[in-house]
Amino acid sequence: MRVHEIEGHGFSGNIFLIDSEKPCLIDAGWDPDIAYCTEQIKQILGGRKLHSIVLTHRHIDHVGGAMSFYGEYGGDLYAHADDAQALISGDQDSTGAKMFGGHIDPMPLTPISEGDRIDLGGGESLKVIHTPGHTVGSMCLLGPGCLFSGDTVFADGGVGRWDLDTGNYSQLLASVEKISELDVESLFPGHGPSVEGNAAAHIGLSLRHLRLIGRYG
Ligand SMILES: [Zn+2]
């Protein structure tokens, strides 16, 4: 599998397109970027369709483009069960749509949970790791040697905020402890730069920061 990063501009989150036998899109960015992202995806797919669109959590900067890409390239839509209902019903509040002046349409998605796998074809898959804390239904996706971390952790010890709707510091800490035990080389976070090599050290730094915040915050 090959991972193409479509970097989020401004407020929009990063999008990752896994170029495998069954192409998979991870996250969908947000409106201001849609024309640019659609063109990028089109070039990579070269006439193929998507097999899956996986949303790491409910926030508008990660899901705003989902229905547009779904319409253009197909693919089954997935989100963790604990964030899925907000997206199925088109909840404008807990997705941050209203707060950030956007809008989301209801999505025909399938809820998934801990341990489920997204088939990439060719014997490869992504495993769902439930990592609540940034939102209650945030998840990371574990691939061969790599982790797609959404807004749970970022490069260089960054951590997602836990002060938005359904966010929770204790849950976030437990989630980062959980992923810090993974042996991963590459980290593909929802915002900012990706990490190629020694990703586990970056996650370890996120854990340290989070523990320090808990002690002094
Ligand atoms: Zn978020």
Image (cartoon, helix red, strand yellow):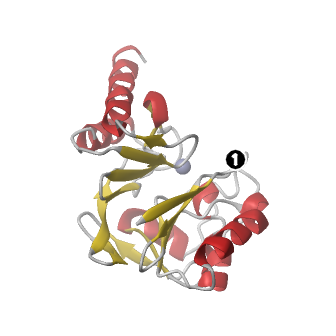
Picture quadrant of residue 71: bottom right
Residue at position x 39%, y 14% in the image: 216
| Nearer to us in this view, 80 or 140 | 140
Pick the front one: 207 or 86: 207
Q: Residue 51's x, y, as percent?
A: 47, 82
Along the horizontal axis of the image, is 30 left or right of 78? right
How far across and how far down the image is residue 115, in percent?
A: 23, 65
Q: Which residue is mark 1?
A: 11
Q: Is residue 9 above or below residue 86?
A: above
Residue 95 can be seen, yes or no: no
Q: Quadrant of the C terminus?
A: top left
Residue 51 visible? The answer is yes
Quadrant where the N terminus is found in the figure:
bottom left
Mark 1: few, some, or many residues within 10 Å (few <14, many ≥20)? Answer: some
How many marks can you see?
Answer: 1
Which residue is painted at 74% across and 66% down in the image?
34
Tell me if the residue at label 1 has its CB under 8 Å from ligand 1: no
The residue closer to the viewer here, 129 or 173, is 129
Q: Where 153 falls versus 217 (above or below)? A: below
Residue at the location (27% across, 70% down)? 116
Question: How far from the left and from the top, in percent, is residue 61?
Answer: 63, 55
Instruction: Relative to 183, say whether 1 is above or below.
Output: below
Q: Dot 1 lies on which element?
A: loop
Amino acid type shown at disc 1: Phe
Measuring 35% from the left and 52% from the top, which residue is drawn there? 146
